[in-house]
Image (cartoon, rainbow, N blue to C red):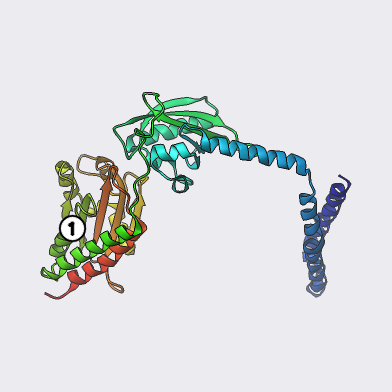
Amino acid sequence: MAQTDEFGEELADFVRRVAELKAARSVPADDLPTVLDAAIFELDHVAGQLWPWYESLSSTGPSGVASVDRQEQQLLKALFQRVPVPVALVDRETVVRRLNFAATSFTGVRAGYATGRPLTGFLAHADRAAFRSQVAAVARGEGDRSLTVHLQQQPAVPVRATLTALRPSGEPRTAVLVVLQPADSRVPSPERVPGPVPTLTETTRHAALMDLVDAMTTALLSGPVGDPAGVLERAAGVLHGRFADWVVADVAGAARLSRTTVLAPSDSVAGARGVAAQDPVACPLVVEAARGGSTALAVRPEDPDAFGRDTSGAPILVRANVTSLLCVPLTTSPGPVQGVLTLFRCGARRAFSMAEAQVMDMMSRHLALAMSAPR
């Protein structure tokens, strides 16, 4: 304790000397070198004496208490991770701070991916606003809540979310503990719990992507070039089904963008008509890609209006249940953007990966060359 008091006195003296140096900035210019030398001396004093002194006090502090606290924290973390009920810790904005093992199995989302992202991004669009509002109310101290939500990968299965306030030690704000269970309140068995999205081996993924590149190259070389709409139609036929559920192609004309091709799942004929009738200028993602010339990859897009709305006024991403998308400008470097290709994956289908986005970016240059080649 005596060393701590002595350090406090020395630190207080240092603060007073710094205040005097600040006041000395108004001295004549000829005297400023003396003030500068004093400031450098004080900095050396901090680096050479005060800081090592502080580190020594920190390492020789109440180690017994700190050790007990660390053991308690480790025990609580282990309990959180091993409890057999899906549990997530979020802040008042629903951003995930922790996700236990049971929650990763229940939601099919890895903890490393979920951390730092809003939990609402893994819910169906219709449930996001209500869930966000209830979490904010619990964080404000208005009592525990419970509501029924639906995971985006399994929208037909109702999930009961129970929310309770929690104040982590040493933190100024209240967090919210979210417990997820099937709406029938039964603990899910391993057979009923949706596991993580299955990941293929790197070799299989690479082979599938190479097959896609081969099919695209064959389609481009076997048809006429220099016809942007025709090139995009052939490319869309290759991508539709095997690579994406939806394929939307827009050509950048002299005046404005025009939609040329819309391929959708067989059960979305009405939705396809609405997307085909949409003005591409009303799609923020398409406009941004046409202007900036950069690929956009989004998994569980948070903004429902990112691709605009259909003729009925409904957000297209919500109506099509889009879980991941790729928006790729078609351009050669250097050169203007000649079109934009947008791909949707829906429902429980595996999200687009960075490797797939890279391959699509490569194919986009081939498409741009075929579109701009002389007939």
Query: For the point 76% across and 44% down, which residue is it?
Result: 63
Percent x, y of residue 177? 51, 33
Percent x, y of residue 22? 77, 61
Quadrant into which the N terminus falls = top right
Percent x, y of residue 202? 35, 59
Percent x, y of residue 12? 83, 52
Q: Is residue 295 left or right of residue 68?
A: left
Q: Nearer the viewer, residue 321 or 307?
A: 321
Q: Nearer the viewer, residue 357 or 39?
A: 357
Q: Is residue 295 visible?
A: no
Vertically, is 39 above or below 239? Answer: below
Quadrant into which the C terminus falls = bottom left
Quarter occupied by residue 209: bottom left
Vertically, is 358 above or below 120? Answer: below
Q: Nearer the viewer, residue 298 or 153?
A: 153
Q: Quick one: SS at disc 1?
A: helix
Quarter occupied by residue 224: bottom left
Query: For the point 44% across and 37% down, which residue is it?
Result: 103
Query: For the point 37% across and 45% down, which residue is it?
Result: 302
Q: Amino acid at mark 1?
A: Ala
Can you identify the residue that label 1 sits on?
236
Vertically, is 200 above or below 83? Answer: below
Q: Is residue 78 visible?
A: yes
Query: For the point 14% across and 70% down, which residue is it?
Result: 221
Q: Is residue 372 left or right of residue 187?
A: left
Q: Is residue 32 left or right of residue 124?
A: right
